[in-house]
Image (cartoon, rainbow, N blue to C red):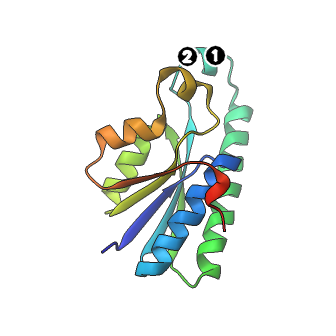
Amino acid sequence: MYDNVLIATDGSDEAEGCIEHGLDVAEAVGARVHVLYVVETKANYILTVGLTDDELRSYREYGKEVVSEVVDRVSERGLSGEGAIRTGRPAEEIVDYAAENDADLVVMGKQGHGAVERHLGSTSEKVIRMIDAPVTVVAGPQWTS
């Protein structure tokens, strides 16, 4: 059914439910897991004015920590997987990564912690409109086991 499951996470507490759900689905069908974190840099010039190279490095380091932790959980379940960090507009990067890696399913949270999502529409809504693969949107941490 699914060979490649993409879990898109921003590392927020709200994303924990989507991580668990994505891992559960992948485990049930024996799928390879892809974990993606996107460093948002182009969503809105107001949010990025004055963003230094050190701050961008800090966001990338945070993303690496998030991805590494989830990839460790993938291994603990006996699954194969890999992680990636991208930089850009989250919805576009998720859709591009899914296409490049033949994702059969994208699992993501309902809303992350970005201010832009609250004002311009959520990343998950944009991904749903832009992608050809199925998308499962998980609401909140209540899904954790």
Near mark 1 (Cα within 10 A), the count class, few <14, some 14-19 or many ≥20, is few
Q: What residue is drawn where x is 56% and y is 25%?
A: 118
Please name the residue that numbered disc 2 is placed on: 45
Q: Quadrant of residue 134?
A: bottom left
The percent coordinates of residue 96 (x first, y second) are: 35, 47
Count the marks: how many?
2
The amino acid on which the numbered mark 1 sits, given as a three-letter code, is Val
Q: Which residue is mark 1?
A: 49
Q: Residue at x 71, y 56 (%)?
A: 65
Image position, residue 18 (x, y; %): 56, 56
Q: Position of residue 139 (x, y in %)?
A: 56, 48
**Picture layout, residue 23 above or below residue 116:** below
Q: Amino acid at mark 2?
A: Tyr
Residue 109's place in the image compared with 125, above or below, is below
- In-image side of 74 versus 6 (left or right): right
Give the CA separation, mark 1 to mark 2. Answer: 6 Å
Q: Is residue 77 above or below residue 122?
A: below
Which mark, by number, is residue 33? Answer: none
Question: Which residue lies at the image location 54% right of the left edge and 20% below the top edge?
Answer: 119
In the rendered structure, the answer to whether residue 123 lies left or right of residue 98 reads right
Query: Is the C-beta separation of discs 1 and 2 under 8 Å?
Result: yes
- For this orientation, the residue located farthest to the bottom is 78
For label 2, the SS is helix
View extreme (left): residue: 132
Q: Quadrant of the N terminus?
A: bottom left
How dense is the environment of label 2, judged by Cα within 10 Å: few (below 14), some, or many (20 and up)? few
